[in-house]
Each structure stands twice: as structure tokens, then as C-alpha cells.
Amino acid sequence: MHIPDGYISPQTAGVFYAIMLPLWALASRIVKSTLMARQVPYLAFGACFVFVIMLFNIPIPGGSTGHVVGGTLVAVLLGPWAAMIAITVSLSIQALMFGDGGITALGANCFNMAFALPFVGYYTYRLIALGSPKWSVRRAIGAAVGAYMGLVAASALTGFEFGIQPMLHRSMDGRALYCPYGLNVALPVMVGEHLLIFGWLEAIVTYLAVRYLQKEDVHLLPD
Amino acid sequence: MLCILAPLGLVIPKIFRSTAAWGEWGPDELGRVVGYIPQGLASLVSVWRSPIPGYAPAGARSDPGSLSVFYILSAVAGVMIIAALIFLLGKLLARKD
């Protein structure tokens, strides 16, 4: 769900950069006051994990592909603000170095995958896992459900951002200037793909990762 | 902590994808599907030329074997850059224990 350059208008792109700038600033401030030096390797691991896992393109019926993000896992381990920073770094490198996601669209992609995804994921996890001990299955399930919801939320936002383009930006002859697919296509496709397929993969990967970490070093999970 | 390296062993290039992910088509592919290339898209698509587009350098051999190698090298390069950036950010943001 990386939006490439050209699919959203400069105006749309600008709006999301405007939203992200204060969020990034806030994340820096919060992380500065809570992140311990010994957690930095985990943040690096989180960012690399997210980057690597997004390299696995999974083909689906109909010929399209998609991927898992893994952002909720990072949020569960380090909090949503640190996750936002980690995912932002990964998305930035993907866009700048590999053309995976546009540069103009980076603000929107970060809003979807670096903000909405880990925040929805994290708070869903907290809601479900509330009160359960660090080693419990409920924690892993909470993280998995959170991951699912987070990914679907991100996909809905992406579909929305794609889908409003033809409504907002048309040329004189009626042709779309940017994404040509309206909400009636973009939203169901994006949400459908992730609700039915990628959300489940995200949930399974997150569940397995949390169970693994619970066995390896349960103290990695914050209280 | 060196499980940063472990996922790399699993980078299997998915070079047999039939089309791009939904909404990630290049201008030509999109043009073929909808019958025209949206003007705004045509002008914005080249606003940034990344060094390694699609995780494989442009103009390089594109057989599956070579693509796999480039994919893995790109993954390694990406991980190293990201790790370096995070450690740099860590120096600026993290509190000393």
C-alpha cells in the first residue's frame, strides 16, 4: 500500500506532510524523554524488521501483490511513538533509495503506515491484553488482533486517499489528473485485500513473533 | 541481537509477481488499463529518480538469477543504512542509562 508519486495530488500530499510534521516533532519529544540508550538496538531491529518484511511480496488471486508491515509488533515492544519513528525511517529509505513509495506521497504513506497502523495496533493490543501477564497467550492474541486492525485501518486510509483524487482533481476533458479510481473502487479493493488476506498474515506473523519473544526473553515486553 | 541478520536469510525475491500491487502501477501499465495516463501522474512520476528503483539497478541484467542477487544486496544495503540512521537518531534522542 505504498502510494507512488503521481497517484495523489500535490495538494493531498501537502496536507499529509502538514499533518505529519507536528506528529514527527511530538514523537521526537516523547521518545527523547522515554527511550533508554539500551533500547536503541531494539529500535534499529524494529526498523530493519519492518523494512525486510515489506520486501516479501505476496501474490494474491487477481494478479496483485501485497505485503505485511509488522508495525504493531514494534509498537508493542517499544511503544507507538518509537514505532512511528522506526517505520518512518524504513518508509523513507524505501522511497528515497528504492522508489518504493513516492517522495511526494511520503507524508501520506507515513500517516497511514507509521502513524495510524501502530497507534490503532498498539491501543487495540492494550485493550485486549489489559491486566494479563507478560507471558500469557492473551498478550500475543492482543498483539495479533491489533496488528490486523492496524493494517486494515492503514489500508482504509490509503484507499480513501486514492479514491478522493478523481473527485477532487479532474482536467477540462473530464479525465482524472492523478489516481483515476474513485472511492467506489479504491476503498473496497484496498480494504478488501487487507481484511481478507494481508490482515490475517500480519496477525499470524505478529502472533508468532510475540510468542517467540515471550519464550526467548519475556522482559522485552513492556508492562 | 544479531537476529537482524536472520531475516536476511529469508529474503526470497518475489520476481514472479504478475502485476504490481494495487495502486502501485507505473504510468504505462496504468495507461494500458484505464486507456490514458493521467496528466498529473505523468508529471509527478519523475519528480524523484531513486538510485536503485525496484530494488534492482536500472540497466542491469534482469534475469531471475540476477534479480535475486540484486534484491538480496538491496536488502542488505537497506538494512545497513536504516540501522545506521536509527543508531544516529538514538544518539540524539535516547537517554543515557
Image (cartoon, grey):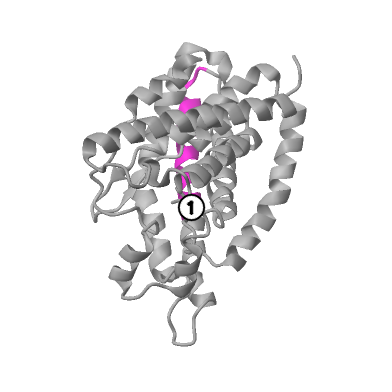
- The boundaries of the magenta stretch are A135-155
Instruction: Tell me if residue A131 can be seen.
Output: no
Q: Secondary structure at mark 1?
A: loop
Instruction: Give the x, y percent position of residue A70.
Output: 47, 35
Instruction: Tell me if residue A57 can be seen.
Output: yes
> Which residue lies under the disc numbered 1?
B49
Query: Is residue A151 covered in magenta?
Result: yes
Residue A180 located left or right of residue A107: left
The residue lying toward the viewer, choosing from A214 and A155, is: A155
Report the predominant secondary structure element of the magenta stretch: helix
Q: Quadrant of residue B25?
A: bottom left
**What is the three-letter code of the residue carrying label 1?**
Arg
Residue at 33%, 42% (x, y): give it: A57
Disc 1 chain ID: B
Q: Is residue A42 above or below residue A194?
A: above
Q: Quadrant of residue A180?
A: bottom left
